[in-house]
Amino acid sequence: MRYYARKLGFYLVALWAALTLNFFIPRLMPGNPVDTLMAKLAQRGGQVDAEARRAYALLLGGDSEGTLLEQYFAYLGNLARGDLGVSVSAFPTPVSEVISGALPWTVVLVGVATVLSFLLGIGLGAFVGWRRGTWLDSLVPATTLLAAVPYFWLALILVALLASGLGWFPLIGGYDVVLDTGWNAEFIGSAVYHGTLPALTIVLSSIGGWLLGMRNMMVSTTAEDYVLTAQAKGLRGSRVMVRYAARNAVLPSFAAFAISLGFVVSGSIITEQVFSYPGIGSKLLQAVQNNDYALMQGIFLVITIAVLGANLVVDLLYAVVDPRTRAQG
């Protein structure tokens, strides 16, 4: 129990530190969300007197009359009540609505792409590591090259080839705009169709890392005594590869995969920008461009909780799988 209590205490302190940084970092940036909103209002012919500015400052949580410490405690109090504020870039929509609208798109797109790249990378890595020294080793530099290509460049190449050239996929968007959003077959099919090319970009750019790591682990695992003993007993090669070698070699990759799932909610900003995908990455970029403190803080809060939660789960699972961790911790 002491081990689990220490772990929970550590992650609570890490969460508090992340929330504190989440409050101060946007305020160190140049610009002011109230000024941004007032400029938009002025462009539309609205009245921008001192009373209007004061009202918007109070509404957005940017009241400069209070000290920074008072704003900080007000920010923590609002978080405790589940109030994330009002978004400037999507004014007057609450931040929670902006995030809840964009998050499912990112979770589905990046989540599915992450799972696919992990399964493909691990499967290919196990096979290449088992058949090391053959022509299959050429897959390693090929996939590593894809991972080294700048992300936006790979996305643009796929758009030029598969969308503009062959016309197999739509150029931009998350679904056909003539459809009404909802849980019906036509809309879901359109969303899958529009998300295929962005997902392919993510899979191609990340599969190399999983393949290389699994391949190297397989090479070292196949030299272990239990694998050599299984081969000496005359067991089928496929069984030795899957049940003895790959099963043990995948453990480090599985831990990294669990952590990478925590970053799924942060989205893929470049991919979403290239494909104009309505995910959380696009909202984050929009928030930075508009000095939208509340939206930035809300998105960072979701990312922080997801990453810390994933790390906590991995730590607790490791303690169950390997009791030596609890003894040493």
Image: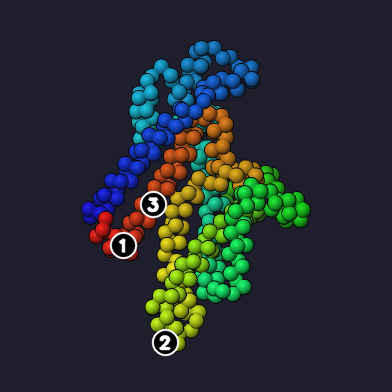
Q: Residues within 10 Å of mark 3 (few under 14, many from 20)?
A: many
Instruction: Tell me the kind of residue under disc 2.
Output: Lys
Q: Is residue 246 above or below residue 149?
A: below
Which residue appears at 30% of the width and 46% of the height?
10
Q: How is the image coloured?
A: rainbow
Which residue appears at 43% of the width and 72% of the height?
221
* Image coordinates for residue 303, horizontal then vertical, percent: 45, 44
Which residue appears at 46% of the width and 58% of the height?
257
Question: In terms of secondary structure, where does tag 3 sit?
Answer: helix
Q: Residues within 10 Å of mark 1 (few under 14, many from 20)?
A: few
Question: In terms of secondary structure, where does tag 2 sit?
Answer: loop
> Which residue position holds label 2?
233
Sequence order check, earlier mark of 3 and 1: 3
Sequence order check, earlier mark of 3 and 2: 2
Which residue appears at 37% of the width and 54% of the height?
313
Looking at the picture, tell me which residue is in the foreground, 294 or 20: 20
Instruction: Tell me the kind of residue under disc 3.
Output: Asn
What's the mark number on residue 320?
1
Residue at the limit of the structure toward the bottom, as seen here: 234
For the question of whether residue 175 can be seen, the reply is no
* Image coordinates for residue 224, horizontal then vertical, percent: 40, 75
Mark 3 and mark 2 in contact? Answer it, CB < 8 Å. Answer: no
Mark 3 or 2: in front is: 2
> Which residue position holds label 3?
311
Looking at the picture, tell me which residue is in the foreground, 33 or 179: 33
Residue at the limit of the structure toward the right, as seen here: 165
Instruction: Tell me the kind of residue under disc 1.
Output: Val
User: How much space separates mark 2 and mark 1, taking CA atoms?
Assistant: 31 Å
Res. 82 image quadrant:
top left
User: How much space separates mark 3 and mark 2, taking CA atoms?
Assistant: 40 Å
